[in-house]
Amino acid sequence: MPSAAQDALRRLARRPLVLLGFAIAAAAGAAGGVLVLSLEDLPDIEDLMHVTPTAGARLYDSGDPPEMFSQLAIEQRTFVPLAKMPRGLLDAVVSIEDERFFRHWGIDLWGIARAMAVNTIRGRTRQGGSTITQQLARTLFLTRERTIQRKIKEAILAIKIERRYRKDEILEMYLNQHYFGHGAWGVEQAARAYFGKHVEELTLPECALLAGLPQAPNAYSPRQDPEKAKTRRNLVLAAMVRNGYVEKAEAEEASASPIQLRATEPTNAPYFAAHVRKYLEESYGDQAVARGGLSAFTTLNLRYQTIAQAALDQGLAAAETLVAASRRGGASSSLRLQGALIAIDARTGAILALVGGRSFRENEFNRATQARRQPGSSFKPVIYTTALLSGFQPADLVDDTAVAFPGRDGKTWTPVNFDRKNLGMMPLRRALALSRNVVTTRLLNQVGVRTVIGTAKKFGYAGPFRDDLTLAMGTSEVSLLEMVSAFSVFANGGVRATPYAIRLVKDSQGTVLEQQKPELVSVISPQISYLMLSMLQDVIDHGTGHLVRKHGFTRPCAGKTGSTNDYTDAWFVGFTPSVVCGIWLGYDDRRTLGKMMTGGVIAAPIWASFMSEALEGAPIEDFVRPSGIVTAMIDPGSGLLATKACKRVKAEVFLEGQAPTRVCDREAKAPDFRDQEYTYVEGSQTITGGPGDFPAPGPVQPEDTSGQEEGF
């Protein structure tokens, strides 16, 4: 509820004399500041209309010597006289940025007073009082530092500009000099960058969209956030109605129109460059990135990047062929299948390659860092890790028979395996390799949802998390960047490597502004990590990730497939001792990929292609086994020590002191999943029969569907 003081302020704010009082107070404060401010360092405004463009930040790769692969926000300016600009653009800018522009003398005391009143009433800063002239002064001569001295300088410069130039000249300079995002300085370059046309060709909704950008080009960019850009555009149109520039019906028609953008020219490693640019602008400001001569030395491996782009392009083309075949004559879609790839150094977190989508030219949305999607079964290692931390061992048997759990609405929920079959008792190792939903849900129920969420947070997942048993199906959304960071725990002996993209930043004089070092976080013990690593190796060698081997990748590796409910997302995240790589495929509107289009079928082959070429010629590394791990020969059907009577024997790893001491008694007929029938599916081929020993790479049961939410 609003306080009495706020109510009083609201009533007072409606009275012109009160606003004038605020204005007088503001003017008095500014005057006091002027008395103590040295004016010797104020710039000369005489040559304001002839500002020389300067080069933007340079990005370098991680090579020795570093190679420049991109230059950010090079100032592209094309001067356009005010007479050639559409009237709607001028009215839109004045309406949203400075509606009293033609009535003030550089500083709008009335606007400052109104902003102060609104901010006081709302308890936080919601409105600013800077005029177009003040913004012009700040853009050309000053920084964005939030100090009283800078604000006073800005005000004095604005007054000097107003005394020297006419209003139309000031507006012309503002529209030709201001930054509109994505390297576009001035409205002509902005019109070309966003709409592929000259400024005089802009429609009313296009004028309104550009007018809304100067306040925050990144936040309101239609390429970064179309919905926020549309909301901002419509706010501008409403302001134009309020100020009498357009009729309400015309504004409503413009507000209903879709935003139609033109593709931009990509740079080398465009998604990575955009990721770095966002960080630099947040850290140093738009002006420093565009005009400050910064040099950023990144973690990018250009060779890896080239391989990653090619592997994803080829993999998406192959996946689209499979997707089309899976639809079996159904309605085709004009929407293109999308994908993303990130590869990081497993030991440091340095981002080696990053592809955020099929084409930066078509869409700048970075699906590698910005998209949040359900991970499906690729989240299961977090649950299995929690089980190991709770005392389970890879050889422990868990029941895969059907089970019903009570739901919050009084109904029951029964998790379902991908093949709709239940295989009875089986070891954790095999349950993970075959991605059994029922086993995973039983584990989650036993160790506790909240406990698993705690583990997930330690692995670097941001959440929010589903606080129910559907967490077993990977229903809490994550980013691909989080996934590769989480899997670095298993590659790196229990230590998570936080992904980072910049090693060093220097200013135009070569002074080091920032130097980033690897951020390593201990998550689990090396022993627990090794047990999980061993099980994740079976996912590739004997489970749902077997296509990695069939596509020729023979190095020691481990990983996990992931697919979501109705096949909307396909994942594969895998690693060697030195590189963690994650792949995601799906449609932006979350439509189904088609039956059987799982992570193991369409994502794992892309991973194999990238890793094979990227690591070609590099020494073959194997995972290091830590102390505290022992090996025992067991009967996998019972999890007990094997004897000569056992038909099958498997070498299994255990924490020291946790290996079984009981000998398998065949007469006791311990639970034996060998007698269960399996169904293996690969493409259109179905093979049934007993599983035998852990099968060699070949046809195995593919990935599960997840996201089963009945009763939750």
Image (spheres, grey):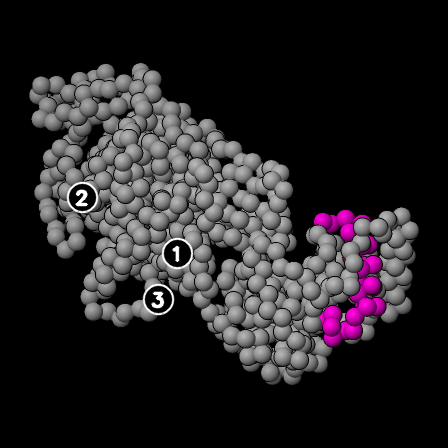
The boundaries of the magenta stretch are 145-171
How far is disc 3 from disc 2 in space, using C-alphas?
30 Å
Badge count: 3
Please say if the residues under marks 2 and 1 sit with CB atoms less than 8 Å apart. Answer: no
Going 50% across and 62% down the picture, which residue do you hit? 223
Q: Which one is earlier in the sequence, the residue at label 2 or at label 1?
A: 1
Residue 215, image x, y percentages: 65, 61
Is 534 rendered above or below residue 237?
above
Decide whether residue 215 is among the magenta residues.
Answer: no
Question: For the residue labelled by badge 2, is the local secondary structure a helix, a strand or a loop?
Answer: helix
Question: For the residue labelled by badge 3, is the local secondary structure a helix, a strand or a loop?
Answer: loop
In the displayed structure image, the side of residue 46 where residue 555 appears, left or right: left
Question: For the residue labelled by badge 1, is the local secondary structure a helix, a strand or a loop?
Answer: loop
* Amino acid type for the residue under numbered disc 1: Gly
> Looking at the rendering, which quadrant does residue 80 occupy?
bottom right
Going 21% across and 49% down the picture, which residue do you hit? 420
- Residue 550 shows which numbered tag? 2
Residues 197 and 535: in front is 197
In the displayed structure image, the side of residue 161 where residue 642 appears, left or right: left
How far is disc 2 from disc 1 in space, using C-alphas?
26 Å
Q: Which one is earlier in the sequence, the residue at label 3 or at label 2?
A: 3
| Nearest to viewer (mark 1 / mark 3) | 1
Going 39% across and 34% down the picture, which residue do you hit? 346
* Amino acid type for the residue under numbered disc 2: Lys
Residue occupied by mark 3: 335
Q: Which one is earlier in the sequence, the residue at label 1 or at label 3?
A: 3
In this view of the protein, can residue 235 be seen by the observer? no
How far is disc 1 from disc 3 in space, using C-alphas?
13 Å
Is 484 rendered above or below residue 601?
above
Badge 1, how many Cα within 10 Å: few under 14, some, many 20+? many
Residue 440, image x, y percentages: 31, 39
Residue occupied by mark 1: 357
